[in-house]
Amino acid sequence: MDLVLDPPHGVAPLRLGMTLEEAVAAAPREWGQARVLRRSEDDAMAEWTLDHVGVQALAEEDGVVVTAIELWWPGEGRVSSTRVLLDGDEVFSTPAQELIARAVGRGWRVDTSQPEYPVIPGVSLGFTRQTSQEVERDADGLPRCVTSVLVGAKEYYDYRYK
């Protein structure tokens, strides 16, 4: 199964702006039953695991409307038939430095001021390069590949620039 990132709109069939209830209903049957968690009065998420790849639809502002979709790599030593794609690049197996270079090549501004959490503001993608697991690392000590990717609305990362 391929999950194609469509920033800043979502990851089909999950779209930013739909309700959490709509996201659960939109998920294909092969995703299985969603687990819906209320983390606080104003924060909820629905999550699925697709052959070890985690998918989360986050309703972070009111607990109702999806504001971000985050996908998590399978984990140390796990192989998955589910691919997470960004313009044809497999996000969890393409080296992070390559993903960043290709994003710059597309004309996107990449903010690496927080090396463990690079973001592409306006597009709006955020990556995690952090894990406690034993994985291959770059010379800078960070995981060679990203461990999660988040698709948010265009202004999702604006807080980093205020």
Image: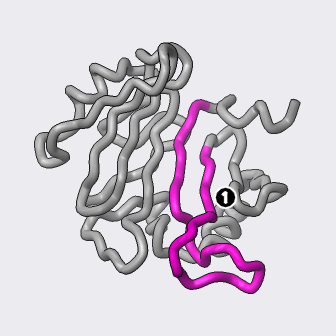
> Where does the image place residue 40, in percent across and percent down from the top left?
49, 21
Q: Is 144 inside the magenta-drawn segment?
A: yes
The image shows residue 30 at horizontal and vertical percentages of 13, 48
Residue 36 in picture, x, y percent from top left: 30, 30
> Residue beneath label 1, please?
106
Task: Choose between 18 and 76: the one closer to the eye.
Answer: 76
Whether residue 81 is situated above or below residue 119 in the rendered picture: below
Residue at the spot 71% in from the left edge and 36% down from the top edge: 157
| Horizontal relation, residue 35 to residue 59: left or right | left
| Colouring mode (rainbow / by chain / secondary structure / one colour) | one colour
| Residue 110 higher or lower than 33, as above or below | below
First to last magenta residue range: 125-153
Position of residue 17 in the picture relative to residue 28 (left or right): right
Q: Label 1 is placed on what type of residue?
A: Arg
At x 61% / y 74%, what residue is drawn?
A: 143
Q: Is residue 52 above or below residue 109?
A: below
* Residue 9 within the segment the image draws in magenta: no
Q: Is residue 93 left or right of residue 114?
A: left
Nearer to me, 142 or 27? 142
